[in-house]
Amino acid sequence: MIIGKGLIAKLFTDHNREDTIFFASGVSNSSETDPAQFKREEDLVKKTLSENPDRLFIYFSTCSIYDSSKTNSAYVLHKLHMEELVKTHAGSYLILRVSNAVGKGGNPNLLMNYLVHSVELNQTINVHTKATRNLIDAEDVEKITLHLIENKSYNRIINVAYPQNYSIIEILEILERHYRKKPDINLIRAGSGYEINIPDVGFYFRDHSLQDKETYLCKILEKYY
């Protein structure tokens, strides 16, 4: 069963299973503050858990939990609450904290969609020079998730992210080469980043020779943009 219609949910359309729930519906905007949006996801999580006590419950959470600037934000506190609900009430579960997944379509406000759109339209991009982000190909999220299911890596919280972060400037330099177009940027001495430990999924990037970050992002751009 697949719950959701966004980028992550669509990854599992061809992998729908009777014994598994892929829960990828809910609040995705880390700046969200509307209590009604949080309540909607909470009600749906509770309903789905109560109606499917014997199914593996896979909940897609977020690596934003590690962002010190968002520690006490409504979004992060909500996601931690959802994780606790899943841990407490699911018979078996996998909580996957995903970084910035890049794929076909998705919310136009997602980082890569926003940057690509801005470059294409020659819009000025305010760049925080100290900011870093972790980008992961959505298809790698799919493959890692299926591997974890196959190996019954249940009842755990697992970070699903690329081994290295990118600075926003690095991303824009690669975009410039990809489009052969110089972005219009306004540099601001601000921003921050956070490291994400991936002890459970690091093997995937080693085994598939995906450790060159520049090549990895170039392939993402060729695939989706």
Image (cartoon, rainbow, N blue to C red):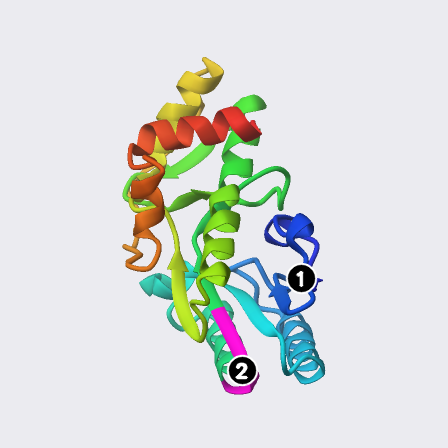
Left or right: 214 as drawn, with respect to 43: left
Image x and y of residue 216, in percent = 38, 32
Residue lying farthest top?
180
> What's under tag 1, amino acid-wise?
Arg
What residue is pinned by disc 1? 17
Q: Quadrant of the N terminus?
A: bottom right
Quadrant of the rendered structure where residue 118 is? top right
Is residue 185 at least partly visible in the picture?
A: no
Q: Nearer the viewer, residue 193 or 12?
A: 12
Q: Is residue 64 magenta?
A: no
Residue at screen point 63% across, 52% down: 12
Q: How many marks?
A: 2
C-alpha distance separating marks 2 and 1: 22 Å
Q: Position of residue 90 (x, y in %)?
A: 56, 81
**Can you see residue 115?**
yes
Q: Which residues are magenta?
A: 88-94
Q: Is residue 191 left or right of residue 7?
A: left
In the picture shown, does residue 98 fall above or below 65?
Answer: above
The residue at the point 46 percent across, 63 percent down is: 96
| Above or below: residue 25 compared with residue 213 | below
Q: Residue at x 60, y 64 (%)?
A: 27
Disc 2 packing (10 Å; few <14; some 14–19; many ≥20): some
Mark 1 residue element: loop
| Residue kind at label 2, given as amino acid type | Leu
Q: Classify residue 8 as left or right of residue 65.
A: right
Q: Residue at point 56% right, 40% down?
A: 103
- Identify residue for label 2: 85
Q: Secondary structure at mark 2?
A: helix
The disc placed on residue 123 is none
